[in-house]
Image (spheres, rainbow, N blue to C red):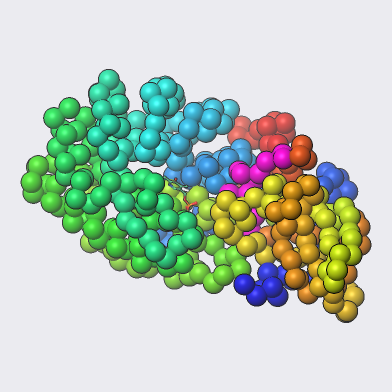
Amino acid sequence: MSLSNRLSVKTPDQAVFYNDLVSQHGSPILVLDCEKVTAQYRALSEQLPGVDFFYAIKSLPHPAVIQTLSSLGCGFDIATSGEIELLQTLSTAVRHRVIHTHPIKRDADIRDALRFGCTTFIVDNIWELEKFIPYRHRVGLLIRVSFPNPNTDIDLSKKFGCREDDVMLLVQKAQSLGIHVKGLSFHAGSQCATSANHVHAIKQCTKIMDDIYQQCGKLLSILDIGGGFPVQYTKTVQTIQEFCPPIREALQQLPDHIQVLAEPGRFLSATCMEAVSRVMGKAQRGDMTWYYLDDGVYGSYSGQIFDHVTYPISIFSDINELETAVIAGPTCDSIDVIDEGLQMPPLSIGDLVVGHQMGAYTYATATNFNLFDKASVVVINENNLSADNILPFAQTQ
Ligand SMILES: *Cc1c(COP(=O)(O)O)cnc(C)c1O
């Protein structure tokens, strides 16, 4: 990708906000702005009226995000007992607005979720279905169908989901076991550049549900359209206002009684965090100036590896001359490089580097490799929360 595409050089006065936070909290930090979570939720629900949203906690499992979304009426998509524990520390109101979406579970995972109040689970094969025999009076299942997506960097159709042709068999098997199947689900791939795969999947699911009614007399009542809603990093993707109309149109073809769910992760969490780090050392090596930040790809920038994302970054300078530079992380490993060959004005030790759109799959996958502390999260604009929802500060780290 083009380097200038990634790097913005801002004026030093634009660093004041970040400098203030760093002088208060140290560095590296991740600044989590709850108002941005609210704005994303509003934008998505405006585009998909009538859809019930369940935030995919794995993208950013932070209490401030969960509280903000909960106060807006959003439900939660959980996949592990750890995610349930996180919800358990919060208000009880979320308990009846959860769905468990991991297609492969241990018995203990199922029991923990049931105990928490979750009754909706996802399966994609016979062995998983049989795990619900002991709980058949307490659950309604969604069958996850696979729709391969060649147009995403993160294709989720290989690891999970049954073939379209196998759905009928699973529904019949469930019927014979006395287990209630209440609908279908899919995940069209993460950070989808367009909504074409969502639209294709909705159309196919509409057909499958009709076939199931015709052949088994079984009326399904839920379609879960998953996540995959994109945000703008450095590559151009459709805006949410371009992405959603074809989905809306496809959903209109569903019979009226179908309840539509979605499990957005990235779209709700990506824009709310900025990573603020400082240059902790520099060196001249060959014709490149190396800058070593106190955060890197083992920390907040881990999504560059796991999530295949290039985050926009900003530096602050009023120097006009440019040099060729490398921006690296702090660990002793050679892959810990954020970018190289950047044309940029020189920085000094202590200067700030800010990464943008760093809420989704960043903090969630950060490590403390080399025993460098992970960035601490600084929550701002939490005041839209009612008093009984606010957590003790200790839990926000
Ligand atoms: C990760 C995940 C999501 C969220 O996907 P995004 O692309 O972040 O919106 C939703 N549902 C399931 C089952 C997931 O595994």
Residue 216 located within the stretch drawn in magenta:
no
Of 181 and 162, the residue lying toward us:
162
Q: Is residue 359 magenta?
A: yes
Residue found at the far front of this picture: 286
> Where's residue 272, x and y in %?
63, 53
Split into 4 quadrants, where in the image is the C terminus? top right
Q: Quadrant of residue 104?
A: top left
Taking the image as shown, residue 110 lies to the left or right of residue 287, namely left
Main SS, magenta region, reads loop
Q: Closest to the observer: 370 or 79?
A: 370
Q: Count of labels shown?
A: 0
Residue closer to the observer: 57 or 346:
346
Seen from this angle, which residue lies furthest bottom? 320
Q: What residue lies at 65% left-to-right and 61% top-to-bottom?
A: 311
Q: Residue at x 74, y 44 (%)?
A: 375
Quarter of the image holding residue 391? top right
Query: Can residue 14 be seen by looking at this rendering?
Result: no
Is residue 106 shown to the viewer in this render? yes
Which region is colored magenta?
A: 357-369
Could you say where residue 81 lies in the image, as x and y percent from the top left?
A: 49, 28
Q: Position of residue 79 (x, y in %)?
A: 45, 36
